[in-house]
Amino acid sequence: MDNIELELLKQIADINEAPNGAYNIRKNGQGIERKVTQNVNIVTKEDKQGIDVFVKENTKYEFIHIPVIITESGLNDVVYNDFYIGKNADVVIIAGCGIHNDHHKDSQHDGIHRFFLSEGAKVKYIEKHYGEGKGTGKRILNPVTEVTLKKGSYLKMESVQIKGVDSTIRVTKGVLEEDSNLVVSEKIMTHGNQFAKTEFEVELNGENASTHVTSRSVAVDKSVQEFKSKITGNTKCFGHVECDAIIKDKAKVIAIPEIVANNVEANLIHEAAIGKIAGEQLTKLMTLGLNEKEAEEQIIKGFLK
C-alpha cells in the first residue's frame, strides 16, 4: 500500500502495520489482506460482497480489524458483513472507512453490518469515518448497523465521524432480549455544505433490557444535521437517549425524538439540547490568553472528546 492508503488506515483504525489478531482489509471494493486466528474465522460471502466473522464461544479479549479504504474516484462500494459472536465471548471489533478523493466523481461506501450476540457475549465495536482529498467529487458514507442481543449480552458501539465526509446517512437498529444492554456513543462534526443524518431504532423486548444512546455533534458553516430516534419498550426495561449539539454560523440541526412505552414498567427517557457556545465559556478561556477562534476550537474539541 502507498502512503495515502497507509494514512487512511491510521486515521480510521489506528494501525500502521498488520494488526494483532484477526483482520480483513478492504480496498476499492476488494479484500486485499486477511488473517484468521484459532478463535476467529473470517469467510468470504458467496452470494454478495462481504464477509462472515465467526467468534468461538468463551473467546476473551481478542481484537478484530475490518477497515475499508477507498482511493478510487467514482467508486460506489457496498459491503455486507455479518458477525456471529459465541456464548460468553468478549472481543473488540474495529471497523470504519476512509475515502481519499482527488477527482470530480463521487466516491461512496455503504457498509451494512449485522451483529448476532449469543448469551453472555460482549462486544466493543468502534467505527470511524474519515474523508480527504482535493477533488470536487463528494465523499459519501452510509453505514447501517443491525444488532440482535440474546439474554445477558452487551454491545458498546463508539461511532465517530472525524471530518471530510460530505454526506452520510447513519442507521442503527437493535432488538434486545432479556438482561441485554446496548450502549451507543456517537460523535459527528460537519462543516461547509455537508449533510449528516442519524437514525436510531431500538426495541426493548426482554425483561430488564436496556439501552443508552448518546449523540454529540457540532454543525458549523451551512452544514445540516438531522437526528431521529425511536425507542420502544415492550416490557420492564430502561431506555435513555441523549442528543446534544453545538450550532454555529448558518448551520442547522434537527432533533426528532420518539419513545413508545407498551408496558407500564417501561422506563424511557429522551433529552435533547441544541444551542450555541455559551458566552461565559468563551470569556473564561479568552481571559487565559486565547483569542475567540482558539477558544471556540478548544470548547468544540472538549465537547466531542
Image (spheres, grey):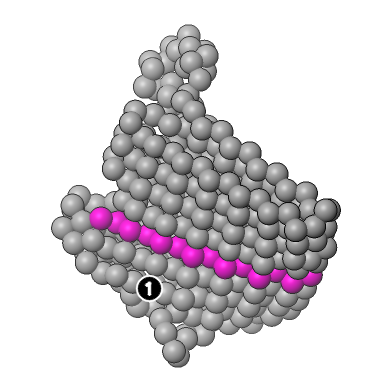
Does the rendering let one see residue 55? yes
Q: Which residue is mark 1?
A: 78
How far across and down, in percent of the image, does residue 29 sit? 33, 75
How far across and down, in percent of the image, does residue 147 sit? 62, 67
In this view, the residue in front, 109 or 28, is 109
Residue type indicated by callout 1: Val
Q: Is residue 154 magenta?
A: yes
Q: Which residues are magenta?
A: 138-155
Does the rendering let one see residue 3? no
- Please identify the residue farthest to the left as the structure is shown: 104
Dominant SS in magenta: strand
* Quadrant of the image containing the N terminus: bottom left
Residue 7 found in image quarter: bottom left
Q: Residue at x 41, y 81 (%)?
A: 49
How far across and down, in percent of the image, does residue 12 sit? 44, 56
* Quadrant of the image containing the C terminus: top right
